[in-house]
Image (cartoon, rainbow, N blue to C red):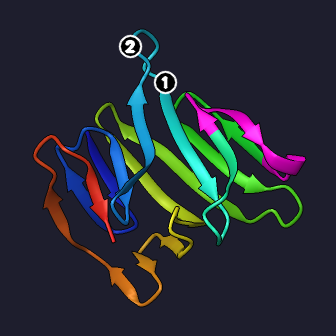
Amino acid sequence: MDIEVGSNLYQNSNGTIEVEGIPQIQLSRHPSTGALLVNFALFDSNGRMLAKVVESTLMFNERRAYEVTKTDTGLVMKEVGSGKILLKLDAKAPDVVSFSRGEFHTMKGRLFHVSPTEWKIDKQQKSGATQDAQGGPAFIG
């Protein structure tokens, strides 16, 4: 699977996005329907889990502070109060998923930001790069 994170392309990945060495997002396609399936863990700045998405369904949602909107080809996770987009994923082709917008804390408590042009973790950023994951995860940070 190819994964676009901002303007960066991670080719031939296994569908996992590792942020700072920890798998935080897992992407796959449903075997019979082809629907995009997303597993994601949302943390606060102290590394405490706030929400968990399993196969594109919100399974844990502390204080009911988050909402997930899903279609067969995409998923958007937002904060209910502010409307801020935490995670926006779209399947652009059978083996290509775009992660075009998002803002959340890594498990290590650092703020991770994705825009259409780049990804950033604190002062570290990447824009316009192509990397072959060789069947492994897309490494960020």
> What is the residue that sits farthest to the top in this orientation?
32
Q: Position of residue 110 (x, y in %)?
A: 53, 76
User: Residue 135 in the image: x percent, y percent?
Assistant: 15, 40
Q: Tell me if label 1 and label 2 are in contact, CB under 8 Å.
A: no
| Residue holding disc 2 | 31
Q: Is the residue 39 above or below the residue 76 in the image?
A: above
Q: Is residue 23 left or right of residue 127?
A: right
Q: Give the quadrant of residue 123.
A: bottom left
In the image, which disc is placed on residue 35? 1
Q: Residue at x 42, y 20 (%)?
A: 34
The range drawn in magenta is 53-66
Residue positioned most to the bottom: 123
The 10 Å Cα crowd at callout 1, few under 14, some 14 to 19, many 20 or more, is some
Is residue 56 or residue 7 the one in the foreground?
56
Q: Nearer the viewer, residue 42 or 66?
A: 42
| Secondary structure under the numbered disc 1 in the rendered image | loop
Write the residue at 27% across / 60% down.
139
